[in-house]
Image (cartoon, helix red, strand yellow):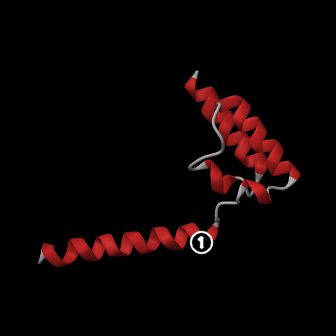
Amino acid sequence: MNLSRIVPAIILVSTCMNAIAADRLPTIPPSNYTDEQRKAADEFLAARKVPVFGPFEPLMHSPPVMNQARAMGDYLRR
C-alpha cells in the first residue's frame, strides 16, 4: 500500500463529503428568519449570551428542535 497516495485521497473524499453535507441544510441568514426562527434565535441569545452558531445553525430549519437541543445542552452543562 502506498500511503502517499491513500492519505491525499482520503482527505479529498472527506472534504467533498463535507461540502455535500453543507448543501443539504444551508445556514439561514438572520435577515431571512421567519418570525418563529427569529423568536428561537432571540431565546438562544438570551440563554447562551451568543448568537446561534455551529451545530445549531442547521437546526434553525426547525426552531422547536433547535430550542430542545439548546435546552438539552443547557441541562447537561449544569
Q: Residue at x 69, y 34 (%)?
A: 71
Disc 1: CA contacts within 10 A as few (<14), some (14-19) or many (>=20) = few
Amino acid type at circle 1 is: Asp
The N terminus: image quadrant: bottom left
Residue at left offset 72%, top offset 40%: 68
Image quadrant in which you'd find residue 15: bottom left
Locate the C terminus and report the quarter of the image it occupies: top right
Give the residue drawn at x 80%, y 55%. 33
Give the camera-side residue of 64 and 49: 49
**Number of callouts:** 1
From what the image shows, is residue 68 above or below residue 6? above
What x and y, as percent, mark residue 56? Answer: 63, 48
Can you identify the residue that label 1 sits on? 23
User: Is residue 53 among what the camera can see?
Assistant: yes
- Percent position of residue 59, x then y: 68, 53
Give the structural element (helix, strand or loop) at label 1.
Answer: helix
